[in-house]
Image (cartoon, grey):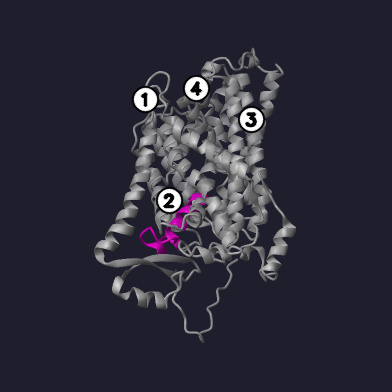
Amino acid sequence: MGSNDDNKFVDEKHVVGIENVSDDSLPSYEDAAVTDGAPVEKVSPLGYHVDWVSVIFLNVSKMIGTGVFTTPGSILVGVGSIGLSLIFWVIGYAFAGALLAVYLEYSSYFPHRSGADVAYLEKAYPRPRFLMPTAFAVQSVLLSFSSSNAIVLARYILVAAGVEAKTWNVRGLAVGAYTVIILIGILSTKWSLRLSNAIGIVKVATLVFIAITGLVVLGGHTRVEDPHANFRNAFAGTSSNGNGLATALVKVNFAYSGFENAFAVMNEIKNPVKTMKRYAPISLTVVFILYFFANIAYFAAIPKESIRTSKELTASLFFTAVFGNTRAVTALSALVAVSSFGNLLAVVIGSSRIIRECGRQGVLPFPRFWASTRPFNTPLGPYLLKWTFTVIVILAPPAGDAFNFIVNLQSYPENVFKFLLTLGLWFVRKRRIAIGAPRGEFIAWNAVLVFTMAVNVYLLVLPWVPPEGGIYAGDVSFFYATYCIVGLAFLAVSGIFYWVYIIFLPKRGGYTLRQLLERLPDGAQANRLVKVPNDQLADWDATHDEHGDVIEPKNTPPATVQEKE
């Protein structure tokens, strides 16, 4: 996926005369070339609670949530055959691995920036000024909900409890469970990470159990009569429809989504680059192995047609097929619910940092609110935003197609930004060369970048191809490409917001937007966009540096920041 030339890296540090500077200080070169965006917090105001164990399980817990338990049926519908379904899980792993290489290279340049995509896109596309931060911030806010996973969590809790899953039972329980998760995240980063790690161990153990059980089923030692039936003529029924294949790949990517979760908390890791290089690939590979054998287990125990119609309860069908209506089914359904709970906890930890970084850039109103870590040394504002939007989306949409539509909707704009993220890596490299920056600790192969962009183009174009059964034959009961249209609409809203706020209003009002660096009492930093009248612009630029910080008199000693453990 990439290369690491330590000798050249050290030699280049000597060439530019910074042999006594730590590796983490190297991104200052890029900061000198790209001055817009959120300020770099050299000392994390959120503390340093993320160790290598948390890196693994932040990724694992976000990946192993509901996807592998809920999406095999819809993936099989899209591809048509057991054989191609298994191949798609391998393709998903390859695509996730390629994207992981992109994130690793970005992280080697910007180890003090949390937020992953939001920070990296900001650095890759500094011009037009504020465009990329605005577009990503608006998209992140509008799509900052985890309703689909919360609904699946509620359904599995009801299955485990033996209660009928009625619409409002599911919705009420989903809201309650998600509220508990948000409160855990708000009250303590340390304990939310510890809980995430513990649940991560449980969910890995659950998938290991399913995988081993599947091997036992294949050996003919269970109540399943013909465990090899689905593997005979495994490619029979393979679909050639582009829409179905693209939709299936979206679902596979949804299952692997989370391999990048720990990059959202980069600035809370004491040795971020080395830690991510070692443990992020491990987390992804472990999950791939577990996914692959879990799918084999499903296909060994459940008839093909039952999997196709399983919707979000594939794992429950597996437990029933192997163990019958016993207490084991209830216990294992409860384990899946625990896994879903851990997934949501890992998601809110990571996404709260992404929203915080969006707010620190200054393009959202009230940047101090988003950046503040008071009163619990956690990002309270982003957590509250996540809770509000998730509850609305849980309660508002009509029952039926909400799960598939929401998964597809969130994926489409995300694929646009993933394409731009990969393309932007070449721009970052070019600027670093221009300013004489040293070679990064991790460099992704160009072939990996091309592969990643090609898959993203596939995911953006193929969903527009009509399904075989017509425009209402997709995985929802309405127009098949509705999620594509709505996803593009979100991007359009981002563009309109940017044009009005950044271009039209300043031009009409006779002012220019400048960023002002604000330091909060808790050590957090944020930029606030201020309106500077055009006739005062020269005075402003003379008294503020390129980062928006007030230029101190030469004899004033610099302020010191006490590190927060």
* Residues shaded magenta: 349-371
Q: Residue at x 49, y 50 (%)?
A: 351
Q: Position of residue 393 (x, y in %)?
A: 37, 40
Name the secondary structure under disc 4: helix
Q: Earlier in the sequence, mark 3 or mark 1?
A: 3
Name the secondary structure under disc 1: loop
The amino acid type, in three-letter code, at marker 1 is Ser
Q: Earlier in the sequence, mark 3 or mark 4?
A: 4
The amino acid type, in three-letter code, at marker 3 is Phe
Residue 352 counted in the magenta span:
yes
Circle 2 residue: 136
Tell whether label 4 touches label 3 (CB within 8 Å). Answer: no
Q: Find residue 2 and name its label.
A: none
Q: Residue at x 67, y 48 (%)?
A: 279
Q: Position of residue 376 (x, y in %)?
A: 49, 61
Residue 361 counted in the magenta span:
yes
Q: Earlier in the sequence, mark 1 or mark 2?
A: 2
Viewer-closest of 113 and 28: 28
Q: Estimate the spatial distance between the alpha carbons at disc 2 and disc 4, rounded to whole Å.
A: 32 Å
Circle 4 residue: 77
Q: Nearer the viewer, mark 1 or mark 2?
A: 2
Q: Residue at x 53, y 53 (%)?
A: 427
Circle 1 residue: 477
Name the secondary structure under disc 3: helix
